[in-house]
Image (cartoon, rainbow, N blue to C red):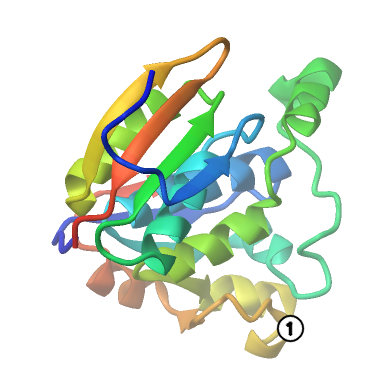
Amino acid sequence: MTTATEVTRSIDARGMPCPGPLMSLIGAIREGTVGDVIEILSTDEGSKTDIPAWLTKAKHELVEVVPEDGYARFVIRKVR
Amino acid sequence: MDDESMMSLALFSGTDDKLQASAVLTVGAAAMGRKVNVFLQYWALDAFRADRVLKDHGVSPEAGDEGLRAMQDQGKPHWSELFRQAKELGEVRIYACADSLEMFGITRDDLDPMVDGVWGVASFFSEADGPVTFI
């Protein structure tokens, strides 16, 4: 499936245990600029709840979560 | 990300599994905008000695051989690395218990630089507003 938003950075965090994928995402958000669209791939079950919870807290946008074969793909937009 | 709530941990155990779990809690709390106070007592303090941080500190008895292997196979960053990440993420302060330092006959200078300073137990409670988790 294609998305209307163009991914500006992709992080493959598959195989990283909790809290690795979230840490990678936070790092990418901090390094990025407003409007960046970050894609992160994670096999960590905790990411399914942790990434949305952190995004709500940090006030960034969860564009979509796509279940893939054995992992999940999160698409995030840095909004501030 | 401002959040007035905080998490306060009194770390007593110096085994790698408990320090690892404590570090995960600390990273998570810091990521979610909570202040974290960590108070190092007894064997946890010993594990934070600069020359011992990366040594093998063993695991809790309930781990057994199978548990130890499962933990090693997971390939998490070392707990000291997670505490460093937590400090970069948010307001995380790690203090050594003055009494435990004295018990070991060591000083602040013997501890890993991630330790912010030395507190008496009353100082800890002057900062730790709310419940304290003892690990």
Tell me where residue B7 appears, x and y as whole percent.
30, 54
Compared across the picture, whether B61 is left or right of A70 comes to: right
Compared across the picture, whether A65 is left or right of B109 comes to: left
Tell me where residue A18 appears, x and y as whole percent.
54, 35
The quadrant in which the N terminus of chain B is found is bottom left
Frontmost residue, B86 versus A31: A31
Q: Which residue is mark 1?
A: B110
Tell me where residue A56 appears, x and y as whole percent.
18, 42
Q: Secondary structure at mark 1?
A: helix
Quarter of the image holding residue B17?
top right
Quarter of the image holding residue B82?
bottom right
Quarter of the image holding residue B121?
bottom left
Q: Residue at x 73, y 23 (%)?
A: B63
Q: Residue at x 19, y 63 (%)?
A: A80
- To which chain does the residue with label 1 belong? B
Q: Residue at x 45, y 43 (%)?
A: A22
- Amino acid type for the residue under numbered disc 1: Asp
Compared across the picture, whether A37 is left or right of A10 comes to: left
Q: Is residue A6 visible?
A: yes
Count of marks, rendered view: 1
On screen, residue B83 above or below A71: below
Q: Is residue B22 visible?
A: no
On screen, residue B20 above or below A33: above
For label 1, count other residues whose C-alpha is less than 10 Å away and answer few (under 14), some (14-19) or many (20+): some
Residue at the farthest top position: A69
On screen, residue B39 above or below A45: below
Frontmost residue, A34 versus B125: A34
On screen, residue B40 above or below B74: below
Compared across the picture, whether A71 is left or right of B129 comes to: right
